Image (spheres, rainbow, N blue to C red):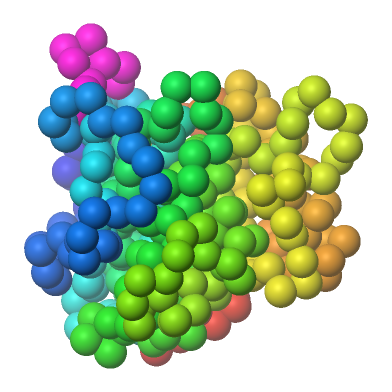
C-alpha cells in the first residue's frame, strides 16, 4: 500500500489502527536462542534455513511473502515500542504456514510493527519447521512456544514488560500453536532443563487469527480436538475468521462454544468474506479490519493501560 495512503489512515483512525504500518525501531536485541544446546525432540530439516517463496510465490495484497523454511534453531526476537507509548503489555507472535514454513513478514514482523504502534512489545517466535512427513500436529513447535513464553517472563523487567500482561497471537497453524499453548501450559512437552522451565508458560490472553486444526472433520463431536483441552483456567481469547475461509470457520465456532461452556471470556468475529492467509494487510474485505477489533478488545480488558 502506498505510503501516502498509510499516513492518511494514521491521521483518521484511533488507537486500534490496524492499517498503519508505522516505522518502528530495530529489535531491542539480536534474536535470542531458546535452548542452551540442542533443542529437545526430533526434527527433519533438509537444507539451510531460507526463504522458500521462489519467483512464482503468491502475492498477498499485491506484495510478496517471506516463507521461511528449514528452521532448526528456534529463537525469539523482541520488538519494543517507543518508550513514550509502552503500555507494559507484550504479545508473542506465532506466524503460520501449515507447520511447513513460517510466513515471516506477513504474519510476523508486520504484526510486531502493528503491536508497537499500539504500545505493545512484540515477541516474534521462530519455531521449528517443517513437520515430519505424515505428522499433522508436531510436538517440537509446542516445546518451542512453551520455552519461549517462560523465557519472556524471565526477562520481563529487562525488556520493559509486565509479566502478568503477556499474550500470544497466532495465524493459521500458528493459531493452532497459540491455542495449544493456551490449553497445554500445565505440562511441558519436554523434560525441564533449567530454572527457566520453572516459570509459568501460561499466556494471559490469546488472539487466534484464522486458526487451523481445531477439530477433526471426520468426527461429529463439536468439541475441539484432544490436543486443545479447554478448562475454566484457559486464558481469555479473541478469535476471528472469514466465513469463506477454506480451512473452515468451524475452527473458531467450536472453540468459542468450548470456551463458553467453561465460562472463559471470548470475543468471536466471523466475517462473510476474506479467505485465508491475509495477515493484517488491508484489502477490500472486512476480514482484514480485525486488528481494529482486536486493539479495542485489548483496550477494554485493560491490557493497553499505561
Residue, x 67% and y 40% (percent of image)? Answer: 214
The span shown in magenta is 51-59
Q: Quadrant of residue 115?
A: bottom left
Indicate whether 101 appears above or below 206.
above
For the point 23% across and 10% down, the residue is 56
Q: Is residue 243 above or below residue 300?
A: above
Please indicate, yes or no, whether residue 10 appears anywhere in the rendered image.
no
- Visible in this render: residue 239? yes
Q: Position of residue 289 (x, y in %)?
A: 50, 46
Q: Is residue 52 left or right of residue 92?
A: left
Is residue 241 covered in magenta?
no
Looking at the image, residue 73 sits to the left or right of residue 16; the answer is left
Q: For the point 74% across and 60% down, which residue is it?
A: 230
Query: What x and y, as percent, mark residue 9?
Result: 32, 52
The spot of residue 253 in percent (x, y) is: 76, 43
* Residue 55: in magenta span: yes
Amino acid at each position: 500500500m502506498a505510503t501516502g495512503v498509510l499516513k492518511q489512515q494514521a491521521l483518521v483512525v484511533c488507537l486500534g489502527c490496524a492499517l498503519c504500518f508505522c516505522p518502528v525501531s530495530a529489535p531491542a536485541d539480536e534474536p535470542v536462542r531458546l535452548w542452551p544446546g540442542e533443542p529437545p525432540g526430533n526434527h527433519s530439516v533438509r537444507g539451510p534455513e531460507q526463504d522458500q517463496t521462489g519467483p512464482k510465490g503468491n502475492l498477498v495484497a499485491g506484495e510478496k511473502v517471506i516463507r521461511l523454511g528449514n528452521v532448526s534453531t528456534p529463537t525469539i526476537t523482541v520488538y519494543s515500542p517507543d518508550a513514550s507509548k509502552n503500555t507494559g503489555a507484550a504479545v508473542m507472535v506465532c506466524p503460520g504456514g501449515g507447520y511447513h514454513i513460517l510466513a515471516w513478514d506477513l504474519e510476523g514482523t508486520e504484526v510486531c510493527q502493528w503491536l508497537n504502534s499500539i504500545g505493545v512489545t512484540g515477541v516474534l517466535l521462530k519455531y521449528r519447521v517443517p513437520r515430519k512427513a505424515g505428522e499433522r500436529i508436531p510436538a517440537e513447535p509446542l516445546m518451542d512456544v512453551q520455552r519461549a513464553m517462560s523465557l519472556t517472563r524471565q526477562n520481563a523487567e529487562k525488556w520493559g514488560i509486565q509479566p502478568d500482561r503477556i499474550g500470544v497471537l497466532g495465524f493459521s497453524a500458528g493459531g493452532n500453536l497459540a491455542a495449544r499453548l493456551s490449553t497445554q501450559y500445565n505440562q511441558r512437552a519436554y523434560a525441564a532443563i533449567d530454572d527457566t522451565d520453572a516459570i509459568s508458560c501460561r499466556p494471559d490472553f490469546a488472539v487466534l487469527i484464522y486458526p487451523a486444526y481445531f477439530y477433526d472433520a471426520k468426527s461429529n463431536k463439536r468439541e475441539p480436538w484432544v490436543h486443545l483441552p479447554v478448562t475454566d483456567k484457559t486464558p481469555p481469547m479473541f478469535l476471528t475468521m472469514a466465513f469463506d475461509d477454506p480451512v473452515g470457520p468451524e475452527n473458531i465456532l467450536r472453540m468459542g462454544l468450548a470456551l463458553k461452556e467453561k465460562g472463559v471470556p471470548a470475543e468471536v468475529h466471523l466475517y462473510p468474506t476474506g479467505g485465508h492467509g491475509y495477515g493484517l494487510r488491508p484489502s477490500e474485505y472486512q476480514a482484514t479490519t480485525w486488528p481494529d477489533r482486536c486493539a479495542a478488545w485489548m483496550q477494554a480488558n485493560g491490557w493497553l493501560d499505561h
